[in-house]
Image (cartoon, grey):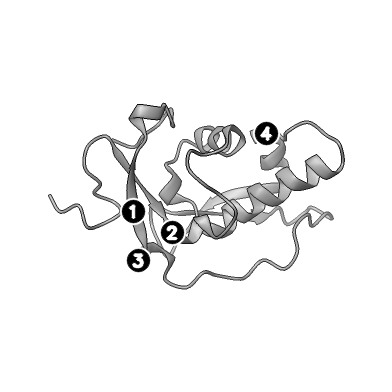
Amino acid sequence: MEFNHPHTPPRGLASFSEAVLKCGLHLPLHPYIKSIIDYYGVVPFQLTPNTYRYMVGLYILYHKLGLETPSPEEFAWFYQVKSNPSDLGFFYASKWSNQAIKTIYGVRNNMGKWKNLFFHFDYSANGFFQNPGR
């Protein structure tokens, strides 16, 4: 098996996009980010960079308002996570069409070829995910 693809990491490793690091994330993942990944039952590489921007933006908004960390259910109230029909196995977040509230502004429409720049990391040593995908 080739390990130079994000969808075929060596056993015990998970793939992570370098583009996501530009969205304000770092490893190890913050428990808030991890809780949303676990809530949707995906691995980090399956979510688009903009989905992470929305997660970080909502976290900052709650913090600025003096609120507790948003729960995965609260994130799901603001955003629906949908399967990408043109890219099977990947998911993106979008504002619910019936929501009058737009929480995050100025997010780029796409990150270009974000899947090409990735690396593998050891999730098992740190207990990162409920659903490691393998």
* Quadrant assignment for the C terminus: top left
> Circle 4 sits on which residue?
73
Task: Give the CA separation, mark 3 to mark 4.
Answer: 31 Å
Q: Earlier in the sequence, mark 3 or mark 2?
A: 2
- Amino acid at the residue labelled 2: Glu
Task: Give the CA separation, mark 4 to mark 1.
Answer: 29 Å
Q: Quadrant of residue 66?
A: top right
Identify the residue shown where x is 29% and y is 39%.
13
Q: Earlier in the sequence, mark 4 or mark 1?
A: 4
Q: Secondary structure at mark 4?
A: helix
- Amino acid at the residue labelled 3: Asn
Q: Which mark is residue 116?
A: 3
- Amino acid at the residue labelled 4: Glu
- Amino acid at the residue labelled 1: Phe
Circle 1: is it few (<14), some (14-19), or many (20+) Cα within 10 Å? some
Q: Secondary structure at mark 1?
A: strand
